[in-house]
Amino acid sequence: MQRDTLVFDIINKELARQRHGIELIASENFTSLQVIQASGSVMTNKYAEGYPGRRYYAGCEFVDQTEQLAIDRLKQIFNCEYANVQPHSGAQANAAITLALLQPGDKILGLDLSMGGHLTHGSPVNYSGKTYEAHFYGVVKETGLIDYDTLEQKARQHKPKLIFCGASAYSRDWDYARIRKVADEIGAFVQCDMAHPAGLIAKGLLSSPFEHCHFVTSTTHKTLRGPRGGIILMKKDFENPFGLKDVKGNIRMMSNLLDMAVFPGIQGGPLQHIIAAKAVAFGEILSDEFTVYAQQVITNAQAMAKAFVEKGYQLISGGTDNHLMLIDLRNKNISGKKAEQALVQADITLNKNMVPFDDKSAFVTSGIRVGTAAITTRGMKEADMQFVVNVVDKVLMNADDTALINSVRGEVNEFMKQFVLYPEL
Ligand code: DSN
């Protein structure tokens, strides 16, 4: 077969883009080369419907080994009894939980998307909002912190079967114990979607959801710095709440229902190349090197937040406990959309984001979301955050000045040369 230079030329341009720019998208990161190699390996050729040791195809002895390794390492990272590494994404992981637990029309309660929540926690445009009766809590206007009073009030009022916690644009830690308390009171399950801060939780730098949440899901490509994918975890397996029995009359455990919800419930063949790459990434997370990385992510985020505040930017909740911050740009007279577009011209990528109680649509937004997971992987330290904030500010304050933005792009490209990315490629 002829080399597809068209595609590989485009891939090389993407590599150059990643090398030259400052990556501030809070949900992105740069995996190690060995994670890329595993995800681009011959494991992609293998069909392996089922689970290790119980597949519907022959020749699964090696994919069984990598999948088992991924499961064992993941259980070790979070000290859990159950892990499923097959979900293709975080959305699939969340879908599997709802499929295992709920019937169409059942009630769920989650953080409103416009307040930092996620599509799969009940948004009307997502299967979760279309299939289940979704109710929402938000954040307190004055503080930007989760409104636990409203969460409790809505839980008591609607009696959902499942309460979601976790967010995609929330910079503070969570009070999981408080959520579990009201869930127990009304007989609900609690699911934490820890996709954003998972790598920080892995190293004990934020509260652990595992003691208090029945189910924990995550993506693997954000602060966990693995390949693009999803996972499901339970600290402790438990008897399914529906009294379902297997053919021998034994009560099925929740782990059985979750495994069945992933396959055959919502997925077919697992992506074995990605599962091998997850195993590699989980091995990296177990290292001391990753502990240093996770700590630096937070140190950088706090230095960056301080630098933004010193320049008069309004951070929702005033700062950050994790890897991200949400900035309300209304006092800077620029929309999130315009900010995102101006910054990308200077090779700085981040995303526009609604802020709580936003008066602009999700397509325009009043805010931006900024994260430090990717730039920390590049090797930046807290002293570098001032440069990053300076160039972001320069662009935002001169968003119509093409010549100035071009000169900032030159500064950015020069600055990034010191943070070498994939020298082997
Ligand atoms: N799209 C992801 C994010 O950017 O946070 C969430 O799934």
Image: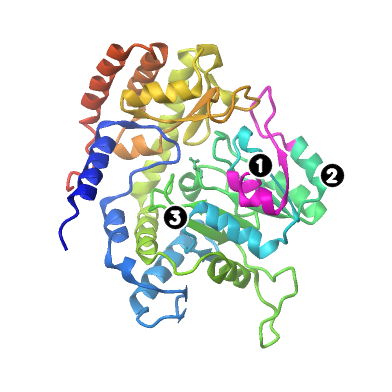
72 magenta-colored: no
**Mark 2 closeness class: few <14, some 14–19, many ≥20 residues within 10 Å:** few
Q: Earlier in the sequence, mark 1 or mark 2?
A: 2
145 magenta-colored: yes
Name the kind of residue labelled 2 in the image.
Gln
Residue 212 visible in the shown view:
no
| 123 in relation to 87, above or below | above
- SS at mark 1? loop
Which residue position is annotated with label 1? 175
- Identify the residue at horizontal 39%, vertical 73% (top origin): 47
Residue 50 x, y percent position in the rendering: 48, 75
Which residue position is annotated with label 3? 229
Which residue position is annotated with label 2? 157
Residue 17 x, y percent position in the rendering: 27, 35
Disc number lying in front (1 or 2): 2
Distance from the alpha carbon under mark 1 to that under mark 3? 26 Å
Q: Earlier in the sequence, mark 3 or mark 2?
A: 2
Q: Are marks 3 and 2 in contact (CB under 8 Å)?
A: no
- SS at mark 3? loop
Distance from the alpha carbon under mark 3 to that under mark 2? 35 Å
Residue 4 x, y percent position in the rendering: 19, 54
Q: Left or right of 190: which side holds 406?
A: left
Q: Earlier in the sequence, mark 1 or mark 3?
A: 1
User: Which label was assigned to residue 317?
Assistant: none
Q: Which residues are magenta?
A: 119-148
Task: Please identify the quarter of the rendering in which residue 253 is found.
Answer: bottom right
